[in-house]
Amino acid sequence: MLIHGVWAVALRRKSMRLIYIFILVGILGITTHAIADAPPTYLFQWGLGSGDVPIGVMFDLNGTLMVAERTSNCINKYSPSGTSLGVFAGACGTPSDAPGAFFFPYFMARDAGGNVFIVDSQNNRIEKFNAGGAFLTQWGSFGSGDGQFRTPYGIAVDASGYVYVADTFNNRIQKFANDGTFLMQWGTVGSGNGQVWSPTSLAVDLDGNILETDFNNGRIQRFTANGVFIDNWGSSGIEPGQFSAPSGIAVDGHGNIYVTEYAGHRVQEFTSSGQFIRMWGSQGSGEGQFNQPWGIALDSGGRIYVADGNNFRIQVFGDAATPTKPSTWGHLKSLYR
């Protein structure tokens, strides 16, 4: 009887503690994502030379980092440690509309076969290259018709090889077959669900949906591969989960979503459902600071590469152990004890 009585008292105490914890959760408004994870550690950087503004960053099938250098009008290759590996495409100098050349290249994407699609922004076209950098084809011209563009920025390719383009100043997203055949478009200018205002970059989540950085609306939107609106999150501002001109986006192997902010000079990380995890960065030129960042990419080891635009460099960050999702369970567990 004594033993059973002791257990009963112990259980009542534990129950009371759990009730106390849940009362605190309700009063304080704590959610499983309210307490931010620590930011990743700054690892290293390398410069691209004064005036070489990096925009898009992307890893090829061999783990080589490709960087679209806007003012140089070419795509350069680097090892993951920053060693220059030469030019992938472009004349690296005066802008040109010749096949395989660029006038302000922006974002890039690749398909499962290693082919690379590059947004040639001021030429209002998409250029396609094979994995070795040989020019294959191009499509697009200035205008607002099907398959035309007005200063496009972003691009993504899904697992089936379909190509999605953020037609930035037409305020829409266009979908193409792998060979450039126009398939469909969606989006009108505005701030309602599914409307866009200067869509800047695109990414594909682990479910094959299309993520869009809605630059002037300060939010992230998600669509199906056929343009059906799913959800969005964020608003213009500087608080966690808000955005000041979101400019680049990437998805890691766990489905977490990384967003750079052109005017916020920082990076934010979210779960696959859009719940805030953590953020880092401020305006400046020191280690871990940014000046109008653009593209973002992750290598196979989870290291984060950021195109630090007007600091003319690539910065690299990493964790001792990359988190799969945030949690306050450790904090609650300490209360329980």
Image (spheres, rainbow, N blue to C red):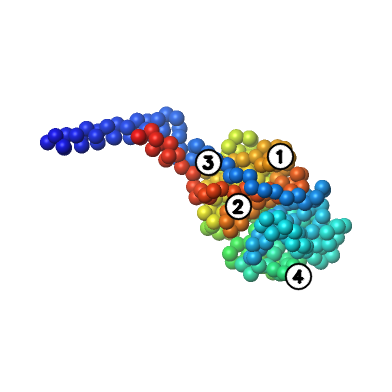
Pointer 2 with pointer 3, Cβ within 8 A: no
- In percent of the image, x 16 and y 37: which residue is there? 4
- Disc 1 to disc 3, how far (Cα)? 22 Å
Secondary structure, mark 3, is: loop
Q: In which quarter of the image is the N terminus?
A: top left
What is the quadrant of residue 215 in the picture? Answer: top right
**Which mark sits nearer the N-terminus, 4 or 1?**
4
- Disc 4 to disc 2, how far (Cα)? 29 Å
User: In this rendering, would 131 be left or right of 159?
Assistant: right
Give the label, 4 or 1, closer to the camera.
1
Q: Residue furthest right?
A: 94
Q: What residue type is labelled 4?
A: Ala
- Disc 1 to disc 2, how far (Cα)? 19 Å
**Which mark sits nearer the N-terminus, 3 or 4?**
3
- In percent of the image, x 58 and y 44: which residue is there? 40
User: In this rendering, would 275 be left or right of 291?
Assistant: left
Q: What residue type is labelled 3?
A: Asp
Residue 122 location in percent, x, y? 80, 55
- Disc 2 to disc 3, how far (Cα)? 16 Å
- Disc 4 to disc 1, how far (Cα)? 38 Å
